[in-house]
Image: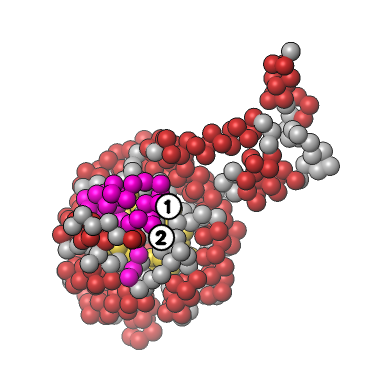
Amino acid sequence: MTQLEYAKKNIVTALMRKVARLEGVSSLELMRLISRGQVVIPLNINHDIQKPCAIGSGLSTKINANIGTSTDESGISDEIEKLKTAVKYGADAVMDLSVGGDLHKMRREVLRFSSVPVGTVPVYEMAVRAQKKNKNFLKFSAQDMLDVLEAQAREGVDFFTVHCGVTRKSLAALKKQKRLMGVVSRGGALVASWMKFHNKENPFYTHFDRLLDIAHKYDITLSLGDGLRPGSILDATDKAQIAELKILGVLARRARLRGVQVMIEGPGHVPLDQIEKNMLLQKKYCDGAPFYVLGPLVTDVSAGYDHITSAIGGSLAAAFGADFLCYVTPGEHLRHPTLEDVREGVVASRIAAHAGDLVKRKDAAIKWDKKISAARKARDWKKQIQLSIDPERARQYRLSSRPKLSDVCTMCGRYCSIKLMENCNKR
């Protein structure tokens, strides 16, 4: 049985108990949330990892880091280093988005080295296989799709992003909308292109029951991809995006009835004043399913700094109910991310997730802030650094003050407000 089926039968599994301990919640409450489809635990029965996690309502906001080869950068060892960096700095899950080089070997290495859940976008491998075999990345069949899904599932992939909502109906809404940016999702664009090339409906949609069979067999969590997510704030919350979201809500219900865990992916580029609306619409149409958002990015002008733009949107999204944030690196829109880009992206996303948790999970999250504030007041630099979200960076900045290192920092020096008031109160 899947974790969802166990939960529906009021059975608390060993995995639920382990995750509940890590999360600091009751295993019975976690079981109830899973049974209602409001929490998922992405973990393939063939994958053994050290750090499983639960994603969804009432839990801490989780973050995902994307890694993987491109057609221009296909070094597997480089991507494994990025994986290790992402986990080191706090990623709760990673996705292998490889489209270049040996995809099977890359995925095998990611699954071998990852201590956290691993996700993929299977349509990428379908396209790459078709390009090699048929000299056309759109020349793959529905059976090819199912073969790739089965193979990746057997290898141990924990969650699949599948673009089931890019249908003739949602694409018709897109055509009427006349967006500025059109389709910016790589998977969504591949599916839409396949549909036009073959003059057929989306195979992920028409063969959804067979997809569910595979997911059920290995207890894979389906992440229903937002192929029509907005790629500009000017396209946010339009009819095409909402049309797809409604389709995903219907498919999510079908997945849960089959005993398959499911979460929903969301935007994208969204201005600040539309983030709350987007979170509420997803929870409404998808019955409270966990929401996995890319960013969202709140402006389009920050090339080179999109990890900051994403963190601004992500903190609001988390505060308003998003459960899983996909990191964005400084290199977004510009280049294949470097090792340092991965570190910056993960830390920025973790800050956003924690900022959101201070709103939606205040009692648990505030303990961390309270401890570091107490250490700051006591000018306990060692403890303050240990409690920082990136202790290495905090230590580096602190030590750079030498030879002036003392019980205060070099920003205020002898005029340190905390020390002044400490002496003042002694009098």
Q: Determine if residue 316 is in view.
A: no
- Give the structural element (helix, strand or loop) at label 1: helix
Query: Mark 1 is on which residue type?
Result: Leu
Residue 113 position within the rendered picture, expressed as x and y whole percent measured from the top left? 50, 71
Q: Earlier in the sequence, mark 2 or mark 1?
A: 1
Image quadrant where residue 248 sits: bottom left
Determine the residue positioned at 21% across, 50% down. Answer: 36
- Give the structural element (helix, strand or loop) at label 2: loop
Identify residue for label 2: 52
Tag 1: Cα neighbours inside 10 Å, few (<14), some, or many (≥20)?
A: few
Determine the residue positioned at 54% across, 50% down. Answer: 347
Q: Determine if residue 151 is in view.
A: yes
Q: CA distance from mark 2 to mark 1?
A: 9 Å
Whether pointer 2 and pointer 1 mark residues with C-beta atoms closer than 8 Å, the reply is yes
Identify residue for label 1: 22
Start-end of magenta stretch: 16-45
Q: Nearer the viewer, residue 254 or 204?
A: 254
Residue 136 position within the rendered picture, expressed as x and y whole percent measured from the top left? 34, 80
| Image side of residue 182 versus residue 337, left or right | left
Residue 51 position within the rendered picture, expressed as x and y whole percent measured from the top left? 45, 60
